[in-house]
């Protein structure tokens, strides 16, 4: 089974990522003053919450990936809850696969729900992944909580966390909002030695 992982970033961050040839964890990315797309208070909490399984540290020591697009975080951006000046069209997806991450020898952990949740569980054994990730929720077009499933939103925010860095060569695909963003990304990629496939993936965004 090929499992795709989705990392969201602002399109303005792409040139520095391409130039560095690496995605840095939140702790290290502060030094390059990347354009943030997250709630400030959540960033602070990620710097303080321990990861209870090896390789340990705190959540901010990891590069975060989702198991599906159209996350609750993107919805918060779309509705102006994070930053009223930020639109989802400015967000690009950098994708890789669990298989590529594991083959590269990267250390990682994964969660069964939002990692800041007080009931979140962490693991690093891929044999147990299917016990942690609710694939029905990941495949669903809707993730809002219901009386029958009151934790669906949090489960949709389960993360695959790669320790410290992800090399640019591990990024296989860049998904963008529209043709204009595709052209912009291809301009950024022009001098790069590694050029992932770039395509418009409108279904990865909210209508």
Image: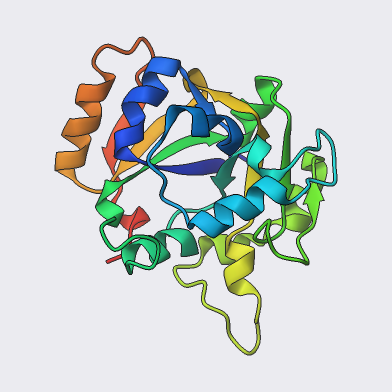
Colour setting: rainbow
Left or right? Give the position of 103 relative to 12.
right
Q: Is residue 80 above or below residue 115?
A: below
Number of numbered labels in the structure image: 0
Q: Is residue 1 above or below residue 102?
A: below
Q: Quadrant of residue 179?
A: top left
Q: In this rendering, does residue 167 appear at all?
A: yes
Closest to the observer, 190 or 116:
116
Percent position (x, y) of residue 4?
53, 41
Percent position (x, y) of residue 177?
26, 48
Left or right? Give the position of 40 relative to 122.
left
Percent position (x, y) of residue 173?
40, 32
Residue ID at (77%, 40%): 126
Q: In this rendering, does residue 136 appear at all?
A: no
Residue ID at (28%, 37%): 199
Q: Quadrant of residue 113?
A: bottom right
Closest to the observer, 127 or 8:
8
Q: Quadrant of the C terminus?
A: bottom left
Left or right? Give the position of 163 relative to 16.
right
Q: Quadrant of the N terminus?
A: top right
Residue ID at (46%, 53%): 38
Q: Quadrant of residue 198?
A: top left
Residue ID at (25%, 51%): 89
Q: Residue furthest right?
A: 53
């Amino acid at each position: 089974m090929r499992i795709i992982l989705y990392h969201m970033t602002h399109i303005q961050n792409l040139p520095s990522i391409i130039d560095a040839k690496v995605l840095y964890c939140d702790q290290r990315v502060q030094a390059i003053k990347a354009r943030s797309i997250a709630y400030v208070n959540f960033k602070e909490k990620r710097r303080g919450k321990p990861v209870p399984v090896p390789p340990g540290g705190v959540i901010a020591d990891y590069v975060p990936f989702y198991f599906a697009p159209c996350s609750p975080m993107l919805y918060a951006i779309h509705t102006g809850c994070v930053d009223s000046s930020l639109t989802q069209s400015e967000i690009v997806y950098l994708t890789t696969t669990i298989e590529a991450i594991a083959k590269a020898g990267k250390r990682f952990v994964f969660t069964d729900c939002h990692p800041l949740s007080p009931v979140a569980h962490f693991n690093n054994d891929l044999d147990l992944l299917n016990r942690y990730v609710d694939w029905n929720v990941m495949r669903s077009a809707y993730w809002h909580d219901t009386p029958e499933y009151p934790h669906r939103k949090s489960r949709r925010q389960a993360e695959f966390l790669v320790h410290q860095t992800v090399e640019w060569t591990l990024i296989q695909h860049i998904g963008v909002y529209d043709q204009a963003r595709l052209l912009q990304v291809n301009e950024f990629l022009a001098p790069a030695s590694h050029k992932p496939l770039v395509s418009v993936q409108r279904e990865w965004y909210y209508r």
